[in-house]
Amino acid sequence: MVACAKVISKTIQVETKGHSDVIDVTSDVEKVLERAGLVDGIVSLFVVGSTAGITTIEYEPGLVHDIKVALDKVAPENGHYEHHERWGDDNGHSHIRASLMGPSLTIPFSNKKLLVGTWQQIVLIDFDTRPRTREVIAQIIGS
Amino acid sequence: MVACAKVISKTIQVETKGHSDVIDVTSDVEKVLERAGLVDGIVSLFVVGSTAGITTIEYEPGLVHDIKVALDKVAPENGHYEHHERWGDDNGHSHIRASLMGPSLTIPFSNKKLLVGTWQQIVLIDFDTRPRTREVIAQIIGS
Amino acid sequence: MVACAKVISKTIQVETKGHSDVIDVTSDVEKVLERAGLVDGIVSLFVVGSTAGITTIEYEPGLVHDIKVALDKVAPENGHYEHHERWGDDNGHSHIRASLMGPSLTIPFSNKKLLVGTWQQIVLIDFDTRPRTREVIAQIIGS
């Protein structure tokens, strides 16, 4: 007998420094999962805004550096962007990096625990060119 | 007391011009969400086919141009692809761009409204080399 | 009348060769979906670990080659990585490729069938530098 699934909504607020700041939000997600009280299901994460992304990474300073280097090849900070011409903005690379990485990530949980690897942290990357307060919506669906 | 979640399936049809055509489908997603009648949950979007992707972007002509420039660095339209040698196709870059961007995106909603940012639109990008009619499956899960 | 959704958890084990090995797991996902016995909903896939990713691709040898070429531009196998300096590892590119591709993918199903395209296969890509046994968690949510 499998129980009916429920949806429980939580919001995680994250203070960032911008400039591709990589922030480990794993413990924040664990906390909202614990408060939700569900046993098995998924946590669907979504960052509001068009200049930030969510993914997983082994959160250590080396890789935090390396991912910025890789993204700078595809969307260089000092590149030319039509977005700048039209809007007088300086964050064309921020938008492009965010759209390529994507704003959503879905993490499974079982027995009230996130099923991530030991060296796999959930991270928000804020690509914008200034500090921001970010909202990550966590829709927890399960039974 | 939290109500049991339901699944409601909708299909969104999108006409594209191909060639990395970026199409804002936000209002289409809002419409199927309204018809579904659910209050809180997620819309899980999936584009059928291996030459299109889904993400979010600030939908304005500058960034629509800029994202094509970025993707052309990773998977150039005029590059060499083994896919062409084997199948006589001309859309190797279309496949690679689609696989890197990914076909799925999950958007939360609350009080019947999508929780996207003001400048964050949901877009289908059709990377194929000809106009296509695309099907986006929207699985709406919530209560 | 729409029935309440349930969550059914399955695990798929995948043996890989590492080195950006691209493995078609579509039939594995179809099998766990069949065993789950649900009719309409989503399969939320997540690969445990920080050096593998999941996406869809037309699974044929040409594109399996081409996607490695594209990823090698962004995160070259022979590049310099701070991750190596700090940890003595050789898999900096594996981590970066995995973080960019992402560990999660959500696939809709209807009438017990995955709604993927005919030429659209679900693939695990193992970017690590050695053979691995991978766990893919499949959370099947539906009614």
Image (spheres, coloured by chain):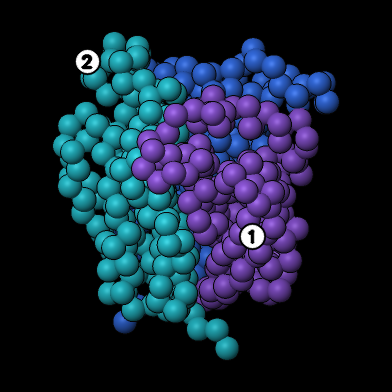
Chain colours: A blue, B purple, C cyan
- Give the mark count: 2
Question: Mark 1 is on which residue type?
Answer: Thr
Residue ID at (18%, 38%): C17
Instruction: Identify residue for label 1.
Output: B133
Image coordinates of residue C23 in percent, x first then y, are 27, 47
For this orientation, the residue located farthest to the bottom is C1
Kindly identify which residue carries mark 2.
C88
Distance from disc 2 to disc 1, alpha carbons, whole Å, reads 50 Å
Name the side, left or right, on which A83 lies relative to A4: right
| Residue B21 in view (yes/no) | yes
Q: Residue at x 34, y 79 (%)?
A: C37
Q: In front: C119, or C126?
A: C119
Q: Nearer the viewer, mark 2 or mark 1?
A: 1
Looking at the image, residue B62 lies above or below residue A89 = below
Badge 1 marks a residue whose secondary structure is strand
Q: Residue at x 24, y 50 (%)?
A: C135
Does A21 appear above or below C22?
A: above
Q: Is residue C97 left or right of residue B40?
A: left
Name the element at disc 2: loop
